[in-house]
Image (cartoon, coloured by chain):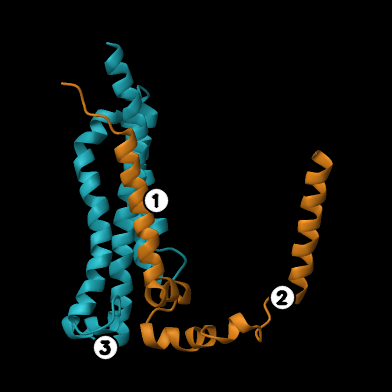
Chain colours: A orange, B cyan
């Protein structure tokens, strides 16, 4: 049974490795992912948001929905900890 | 339970270090526009300063400065600041979290209003992260306390 598992893992790995051959090169400026909105961010972010750090501008302005979700995740993690771990103080 | 440390060197060093750590945390939050940093990182550093106070000065002394109630209020108000800025943008006839609409309220150029909006949500994120980090640490150490109380 272990040999079957090993074969499945090896074959899956080979299929995944074969799939990466169609991927664009690392850092290719003409790849589809780099042609959609990234050039707009790089050329306009500093002018339109008055924020020299483009990473912050993208994180907190263009993608602020995403950051709001992240904050909500952290908040709910804290609330879960309070609900599970906090006990009433005995008087 | 986290006991108060008996060592005067540890206690004095912690007392000297805590304000500097907190100022550095505020710097990281405020300087997110110009350098690596922002709400998440600054909030964690701010929480680390209070945790340092807690492991050197004990649970009770820290509770006087930062009670469970304060922490719960701070964490929810952090998220509220973030979501509230988005709602203010909605009220000013923009999209949700479209900070350029804040320009009318703040009397600045739209680009500058976006910069200020980013600062506002960074403060909200920093508050929420700080309070949650501390609250998790607090609850874990409090759990041991109530265990001992039950034994008595």
- Is B37 situated above or below B150? below
Among the 4 quarters of the image, the one containing residue B38:
bottom left
Q: Are marks 1 and 2 in one subunit?
A: no
> Residue under circle 2?
A23
Q: Chain of mark 2?
A: A
- Is A42 situated above or below B53? below
Q: Is residue B16 visible?
A: no
Q: Which mark is residue B109?
A: 3
| Mark 3 vs mark 1, CA separation in Å | 32 Å
At x 48% / y 84%, what residue is drawn? A41
Foreground of the two, B107 or A20: A20
Residue A67: x, y in percent? 39, 66
At x 42% / y 57%, what residue is drawn? B41
| Mark 3 vs mark 2, CA separation in Å | 42 Å
| Mark 1 vs mark 2, CA separation in Å | 39 Å
Foreground of the two, A79 or A60: A79
> Residue under circle 1?
B45
Residue B95: x, y in percent? 28, 81
Label 2 secondary element: loop
Q: Is residue B63 visible?
A: yes
Q: Chain of mark 3?
A: B
Q: Chain of mark 1?
A: B
Crowding near pointer 3: few (<14 within 10 Å), some, many (20+)? some
């Amino acid at each position: 049974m272990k040999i079957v598992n090993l074969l499945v893992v090896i074959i899956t790995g080979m299929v995944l490795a074969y799939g990466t051959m169609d991927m664009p090169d690392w850092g290719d400026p003409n790849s589809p992912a780099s042609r959609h909105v990234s050039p707009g961010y790089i050329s306009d972010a500093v002018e339109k948001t008055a924020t020299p750090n483009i990473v912050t501008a993208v994180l907190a302005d263009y993608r602020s929905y995403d950051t709001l979700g992240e904050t909500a995740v952290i908040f709910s993690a804290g609330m879960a900890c309070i609900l599970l771990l906090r006990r009433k103080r005995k008087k | 339970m986290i006991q108060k440390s008996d060592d005067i060197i540890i206690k004095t060093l912690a007392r000297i270090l805590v304000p500097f750590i907190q100022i550095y945390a505020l710097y990281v939050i405020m300087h997110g526009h110009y350098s690596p940093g922002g709400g998440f990182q600054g909030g964690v550093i701010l929480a680390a300063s209070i945790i340092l106070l807690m492991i050197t000065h004990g649970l009770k002394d820290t509770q006087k400065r930062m009670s469970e109630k304060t922490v719960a209020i701070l964490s929810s108000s952090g998220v509220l600041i973030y979501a509230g800025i988005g709602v203010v943008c909605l009220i000013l006839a923009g999209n949700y979290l479209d900070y350029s609409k804040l320009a009318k309220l703040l009397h600045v150029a739209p680009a500058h209003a976006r910069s200020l909006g980013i600062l506002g949500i960074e403060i909200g994120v920093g508050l929420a992260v700080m309070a949650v980090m501390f609250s998790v640490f607090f609850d874990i150490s409090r759990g041991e306390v109530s265990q001992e109380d039950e034994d008595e």
